Amino acid sequence: MHASPSNKPLLLLTMGDVNGIGPEILLKALAAPALWEACRPVVLGCAKAYENARHFAPEAPRTIAVASCEVVVSREAGVAVCDGGWPAPAVRHGVLDPEAGQAAIEWVKLAAGWCLEGRAAGMVTCPINKEAVQKAGYQCSGHTDLIADMCGKSDYRMCLFTETMRVVHITGHLSLYDALKEVKCDRILESIRVGHDALTRMGLAAPRIAVAGLNPHAGEAGAFGREEIDEVAPAIVQGRTEGIECSGPYPPDTVFRRMREGEFDMVIALYHDQGHIPMKLIAMDEGVNVTLGIPIVRTSVDHGTAFDIAGRGIAREDSLIAAVRLAAQLSASKVAL
Amino acid sequence: MHASPSNKPLLLLTMGDVNGIGPEILLKALAAPALWEACRPVVLGCAKAYENARHFAPEAPRTIAVASCEVVVSREAGVAVCDGGWPAPAVRHGVLDPEAGQAAIEWVKLAAGWCLEGRAAGMVTCPINKEAVQKAGYQCSGHTDLIADMCGKSDYRMCLFTETMRVVHITGHLSLYDALKEVKCDRILESIRVGHDALTRMGLAAPRIAVAGLNPHAGEAGAFGREEIDEVAPAIVQGRTEGIECSGPYPPDTVFRRMREGEFDMVIALYHDQGHIPMKLIAMDEGVNVTLGIPIVRTSVDHGTAFDIAGRGIAREDSLIAAVRLAAQLSASKVAL
């Protein structure tokens, strides 16, 4: 899949909290030819923090300071880096620093804004530290909420994708009790549509979407729980009416294995942990976090700032490279959701 | 772990529904030296159905018809088989037959009764067909309920064990909504105790028990859900007071991976699928179903009758052998729970 420079999507890579592993995985990923084969990258972050991580990936490209993303870049010439007027404080690995939190969140805002203006094909985010952001005075519970807010969509979908397994969650960070109340036909149907759209953009012909049940054994025909009958099944019927190859509800404790074995391309999970438990068990390093249901392409690494290992050189760039590749796929034939 | 014949535990193996894969996996398991190294087996089932499956495992021992379990057996002499006056109907693979259901359930009752009388060290069950049992006129939702009823305990614990991963579920076949209501300190504490007892009987010194949270990220200190604070944490404190090495509550989406990587010996799961999703994903063939919280040792294969593949010779005996081994371990230093 070697695209010519002209048709490679321009992707904005946000550096995340400079005191975490963000700069390290960014350099390691930018040193990899795979990243440049997938996209034209622009880093939103701090050139000093970038150079501070140089020893983790000596072969990473040098930086070219830019003020906007309309720049021609190549691995040989260097990677464009823009701080948007928010240089990071001096790097102190593993330290919670509100200034680092502030810079990290401003880079995310800049990236989302440029994507919304159509100046970039998508954005890929490195981890921020929620506490540092909050201590800097921001009322945000995470950058996904922030990005969704900027897009004017509070009802986004948290997704986890690997090369062969993909999960769309109908809800995110709610208590399990509150999440149960959201197991409704409309929400499930919208998740099926959003998932189908993503798979189609990724080039899958007639993608097969499985919808998980909510209760043990998918309720055994109403013996324990009626959500499968009252909410899930009608959503599947409607999805099929719309031409989507969706099916279920399936027993939750085997549907992920069936996807892993190739029977399905995607599972719609009815609450956060239903999908997160199997995906994190199998794909800790290659998982990508995707936000669907918003009008821009946004992927993220599937891990946190990892303050405990920051600065040790042992962080892996796999998830970031996978996130870049996926963002490129999703933006290749981008349509508004 | 070669026990001498005299100190090997006597285990009752129930044949299950003869129209499923029960007889096939039973013969295959009895043909394996591993089974005889772990226990002295007595089959509760039908000698004719046994012979009908002979071609799946020609080297399986011949049968010796017995009327009680106090018999000396050896692989060379043959395996004791007792039908308790309930011979099975002619085998018809994959056919739902109430008579087969009736025989299967009566063998289970016989086994549980003998265990309760102390005449056997434990029982290992092959799968029954719930529908066949109900069509035979029994008011039972599964043999686990039946066994627990016979033991006078309605409040048992469903568990899934593999060689290195073990999960105790605080509830079983309830709707997720009803299961949430059972996330209470007392129930969690009792599960910790029952799990610790089982691990101790299996010979683990100072077993490490992790308790999962209920909500995403274990609630993030009450940000979404308070069960971790109000119910789970107090149970852990009390467990530790009793000298049990338990800890948590841990984020549900990483605790199973941590167990898999060796950090814990067991996870207490707060609802059916929280534990079933990861265990079935990783251990489809070697998983063992264990019933804890009852005064007898009972394990079971972790699959159903598999009517769809019955009679084809492709069923695997791994789970049954693992179930036998685990029952032997649990009964080796058996104490009442």
Image (cartoon, coloured by chain):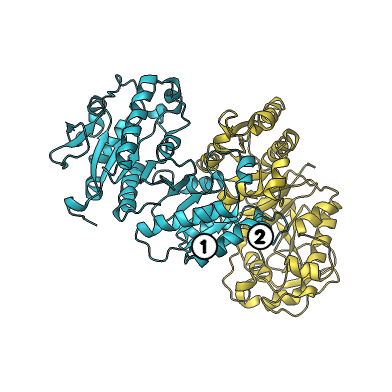
Chain colours: A cyan, B yellow
**What residue lies at 49% left-to-right and 44% top-to-bottom?**
A155
Q: Which residue is at the front of the view, B122 or B102?
A: B102
Residue B63 is drawn in which quadrant? bottom right
Q: Residue at x 42, y 25 (%)?
A: A133
Q: Which mark is residue A239?
A: 1
Q: Which mark is residue A116?
A: none
Image coords of residue B221 (percent x, y)? 58, 28
- In the image, residue A127 sits, relative to residue B283, either above or below, namely above
Depth check: A142 or A256 in front? A142
Residue B107 percent location from the top left of the image: 80, 65
Determine which of the numbered discs, if any, sits on residue A229 in the image: 2
Mark 2 and mark 1 in contact? Answer it, CB < 8 Å.
Answer: no
User: For the residues carrying marks 2 and 1, which lies nearer the camera in this image?
Assistant: 1
Q: Chain of mark 2?
A: A
Describe the element under mark 1 as helix, strand or loop.
helix
Which amino acid type corresponds to the residue marked 2 in the rendered image? Ile
Furthest residue toward left? A77
- Identify the residue at horizontal 56%, vertical 65% (top origin): A237
Specify whether residue B44 is in view.
yes
